[in-house]
Image (cartoon, rainbow, N blue to C red):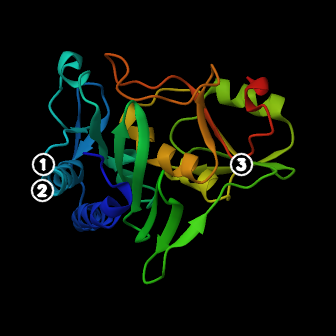
Amino acid sequence: MQTNLKQLIPDVLTIAREAGQDILEIYQSDIDVETKADDSPLTAADRAAHNRIVAGLTALTPGIPILSEESVVIPFAERSGWKEYWLVDPLDGTKEFIKKNGEFTVNIALIQGHKSVLGVVHVPDKDTDYFGCTETGSFIQRAGEAAITIRVTTPAPSPVRVVGSRSHRGELVDAYLKKLGSHVMVSMGSSLKLCLVAAGEADVYPRLGLTSEWDTAAAQAIVECAGGCVIGLDAKPLLYNAKADILNPHFIVYGDGSKDWTRYL
């Protein structure tokens, strides 16, 4: 049976907001940090949000599997057979969370046939949601306000508004920006970088460094449903669950499709 994406969104928003409340309770206290096997930080907030989201999605769609950053490892031999699944980052921007700068998110995506077709990005510290699906387009909803449609900015203005990572930048991005020429830089953490492009508040986000599929899936759906693109350096959209590892290639997010953003590589 075909999943009705539009009907799912209100419930997924509720689940993301509940996870956000769990995160904020810990955010407002002293944060204990552990280190995972890959040296990335892990907090009680990651675990609390993971448990809340998995319970909520399991109740909402019992037949759809869930892959979360904090899940036990699911072998590719098993997940390669999935036609549809939830891809979750319970707390994207753990480093921003630890720094207490507010730039962290809850990311929930629905993947169908290797493509992200529904995305919810909740910003707990701002009580703001970005969300969208292929049936509705993309929206932003701020606390106490009605949801409003968002679209990428076309054509890109001059100077170009570039959004980049607050915690990860690197020489490749610096070289890209030098070739790009006149631009203004906005630093931001987590999947908020992609959301700024979707909302027309930034024009390009070159990510020439390491990310995982759960970092991008939810926001990619929002960008694409707002008229933008998330492409690898081969100019093809990022795909999900198409290989054994869950690492993304380097990629570029942009709004104005009339420009060749890969020529600055």
The crowd level at tag 1 (other Cα within 10 Å; few <14, some 14-19, many 20+) is few
> 122 or 176: which is nearer to us?
122
Tell me if residue 185 comes above or below residue 178 in the rendering.
below
Tell me the amino acid under the disc marked 1: Pro
Looking at the image, tell me whether mark 3 or mark 1 is earlier in sequence order. Answer: 1
User: Which residue is rendered at x = 36% and y = 17% of the image?
Assistant: 243
Q: CB under 8 Å between callouts 1 and 2?
A: yes
Looking at the image, is mark 2 or mark 3 nearer the viewer?
2
Q: Image point 12% across, 56% down: which residue?
A: 59
Would you name the residue on which mark 1 appears? 62
Pinpoint residue 112: horizontal percent, then vertical percent: 36, 37
Which amino acid does the dot numbered 2 rest on?
Ala
The x, y position of residue 132, in whole percent, is 47, 57
Spatial separation of the CA atoms under disc 3 and disc 1: 38 Å
Describe residue 231's horizontal placement relative to residue 147 as left or right.
Answer: right
Q: Quadrant of the C terminus?
A: top right
Foreground: disc 3 or disc 1: 1
Q: Position of residue 179 (x, y in %)?
A: 82, 28
Which numbered tag is attached to residue 163? none
Q: Is residue 71 left or right of residue 211?
A: left
Residue 256 appears in view = yes
Task: Tell me which residue sits at (69%, 47%) in the image.
Answer: 255
Residues at marks 1 and 2, CA–CA distance in whole angstroms: 6 Å
- Which residue lies under the disc numbered 3? 203
Q: Quadrant of the N terminus?
A: top left
**Tags 3 and 1 touching, CB below 8 Å:** no
Q: Residues within 10 Å of mark 3 (few under 14, many from 20)?
A: many
Residue for badge 2: 59
Q: Amino acid at mark 3?
A: Asp
The reply to whether residue 190 is visible in this rendering is no
